[in-house]
Amino acid sequence: MLKRNTDFEDAFLAPYASKSRNSRGRVYKEKEHPYRSVYQRDRDRIIHSAAFRRLEYKTQVFVNHEGDYYRTRLTHTLEVAQIARTISYALRLNVDLTEAIALAHDLGHTPFGHSGEEALNELMARCGGFNHNLQGLRVVDYLEDRYPDFPGLNLTWEVREGIVKHSSAFDKAVKVSELNPKEMPTLETQVVDIADEIAYDNHDLDDGLTSGLIKESDLRELTLWENLNKNICRTYPHIDQNKKKYLIIKSLIDTQVTDLIVQTQNNINKLKIRSWADVKKTERKVVNFSKDMLQLRIPLRGLLLTKLYHHYRVIRMSTKAKRFIKELFRVYLDNPGQLPPETQKRISADGVKRVICDYVAGMTDRYALDEYKKLFDPYEKV
């Protein structure tokens, strides 16, 4: 059965794809599964992890209690995986590896989005700081406790590399010596990076319009939006506003994905990439948009920054979230005996601050708010 998997990869995947037979393996040796490839197995381990389930109640932009419609870290992750799979399939890359990296790329995120990460980074400044890519690796290598033979999930080298080398406008790749920081990441990792950007640009635009923080009139100066708006209005002159919004967002994603696939294939041909080893030696990312699309995306991202991410309501929530995180951290630090017993057991090995950091980073928004009430509200049961 394993041979069937490798035969399929040899027949279908491009020579520059990351084939499972070329995996650099796992930290702890295991007998591999009879009918799942190593990357399929990684994907399944990620989906069944506690950290993955917690993404359901972690903030993307809007805090969970503001409405059921808005994206969470989990729905964002699923959208990234769907877009990344489409791109990967079109480029004949390893879809299983792409999906595993996409599903794992946000496992290290804190409650309350990037504001939670900023708060923990400040609190941990003298103890190595906090970075959600590094935390994601810590989650899959150490904090997930599910197997008797090894700590963590024991994922393959390539998925672990994809987690720490993930980079986008909001994410910085980090250097981990055992994962060869000087090497360019696999094409599958690069696909996830861009799929992440496509997903959050477009779903944040959708959520911004739904919340009323962004008005359709704000978008009329965006060439990408207005061209699609005119085409849809010509085709459906009496279309309902909600349906029109959905069609434009859908078309925005499709337009960017198509451009990305065409340009990336051109880059592969131009750079004469013939193997996965060639990818590692490149000096810049191969997976990218055309110059025209890069220019068209600039005003869209600028609008999201000014109208949504810097909206006073979003800033208020972000500032409030930082206070929650910092006050929770400090109250645990004052008396670590308030931590759950299983968490306290790691203090001697990992240090009290890192243990508290792990505990807070793993919280959902809802759990953090509940803990805050229990610890600070005198009438709340503990």
Image (cartoon, rainbow, N blue to C red):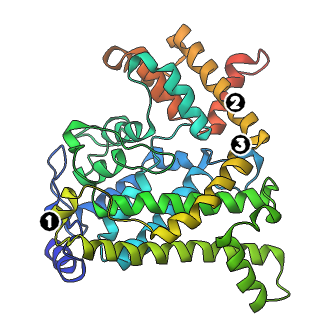
Q: In the rendered image, is residue 382 in sight?
A: no
Residue flagged by tag 2: what amino acid is it? Thr
Residue 21, numbered label: 1
Instruction: Measure how far apart labels 3 and 1 are at the Cα level.
Output: 47 Å
The quadrant of the rendering that contains the N terminus is bottom left
**Tag 1 near tag 2, CB within 8 Å:** no
Q: Which residue is mark 3?
A: 310
Residue flagged by tag 1: what amino acid is it? Arg
Q: Residue at x 71, y 48 (%)?
A: 306
Above or below: residue 379 compared with residue 202:
above
Mark nearer the viewer, 3 or 2: 3
Q: Nearer the viewer, residue 318 or 257?
A: 257
Residue 228, position in %: x, y? Answer: 68, 79
* Left or right: residue 41 compared with residue 290: left
Mark nearer the viewer, 3 or 1: 3
Instruction: Measure how far apart labels 1 and 2 are at the Cα level.
Output: 48 Å
Residue 305, numbered label: none
Crowding near the residue tagged with mark 3, few <14, some 14–19, many ≥20 C-alpha atoms within 10 Å:
few
Q: Secondary structure at mark 2?
A: helix
Above or below: residue 2 compared with residue 300:
below
Q: Earlier in the sequence, mark 3 or mark 2?
A: 3
Residue flagged by tag 3: what amino acid is it? His
Q: Which residue is mark 2?
A: 319
